[in-house]
Image: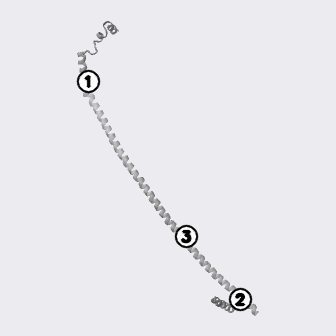
């Protein structure tokens, strides 16, 4: 409250000790510089090394992180290149496998066709042999029947029954001579 009374009685310049903002007060000037120099020396002695140390540590940490990120980036690029090579190799290998599978399938198909043809030829040969054997049996059976019919006809002609082996040989010889003429 006294301060307010002093301001009213003497004005603002006399209460605070300042007469003008542009007026130089050497006492204030001296103490300001003295405090500044003392504060500067204290800061230089105690705070500045800690600030420098923290800054240098942070700089080292950032540099380490940068070098680590560059190393990791190079490693990632190397792995990416390796991945691309592996993918290209896998594609090439897949194409080779497919080509090999096509060749193997074609060979297998040719072998199966060859085997099937061979089996067909064997079946055809067996069928031909069986037909020839059946034909031979049929011819023999027809000869026997022809002999029997001839003997039956001859026996009716002569009114006696011809049944002996000699008669049979005689008729077979005759039929063989007939067959030789045709």
In the rendered structure, the answer to whether residue 152 lies left or right of residue 79 reads right
Q: Position of residue 87 (x, y in %)?
A: 42, 53
Label 1 belongs to which residue? Answer: 39
* Residue 137 against residue 31 in the figure, above or below: below
Question: The N terminus appears in which quarter of the rendering?
Answer: top left
Find the residue positioned furthest to the right: 159
Name the disc covering residue 116, or none.
3
Calculate the distance from the C-alpha at mark 2 to the C-alpha at mark 1.
157 Å
Q: Nearer the viewer, residue 22 or 78?
A: 22
Name the disc covering residue 135, or none.
none
Q: Residue at x 26, y 28 (%)?
A: 46
Q: Earlier in the sequence, mark 2 or mark 1?
A: 1
Q: Position of residue 40 (x, y in %)?
A: 25, 25
Q: Residues within 10 Å of mark 1 (few under 14, many from 20)?
A: few
In the rendered structure, the answer to whether residue 115 lies left or right of residue 181 reads left
Q: Residue at x 43, y 57 (%)?
A: 93
Label 2–label 1 contact, CB within 8 A: no
* Residue 10 against residue 141 in the figure, above or below: above
């Amino acid at each position: 409250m006294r301060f307010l009374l002093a301001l009213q009685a003497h004005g603002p310049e006399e209460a605070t000790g300042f007469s003008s903002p542009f007026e130089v007060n050497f006492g204030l000037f001296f103490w300001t510089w003295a405090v500044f120099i003392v504060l500067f020396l204290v800061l230089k002695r105690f705070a500045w090394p800690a600030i420098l140390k923290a800054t240098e540590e942070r700089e080292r940490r950032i540099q380490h992180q940068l070098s680590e990120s560059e190393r990791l980036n190079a490693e990632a690029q190397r792995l990416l290149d390796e991945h691309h090579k592996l993918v290209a190799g896998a594609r090439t290998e897949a194409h080779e496998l497919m080509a090999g599978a096509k060749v193997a399938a074609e060979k297998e198909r040719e072998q199966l066709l060859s085997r099937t043809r061979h089996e067909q030829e064997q079946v055809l040969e067996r069928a031909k042999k069986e037909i020839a054997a059946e034909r031979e049996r049929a011819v023999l059976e027809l000869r026997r029947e022809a002999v029997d019919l001839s003997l039956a006809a001859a026996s009716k002609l002569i009114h006696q029954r011809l049944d002996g082996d000699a008669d049979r040989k005689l008729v077979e010889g005759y039929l063989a001579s007939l067959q030789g003429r045709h």
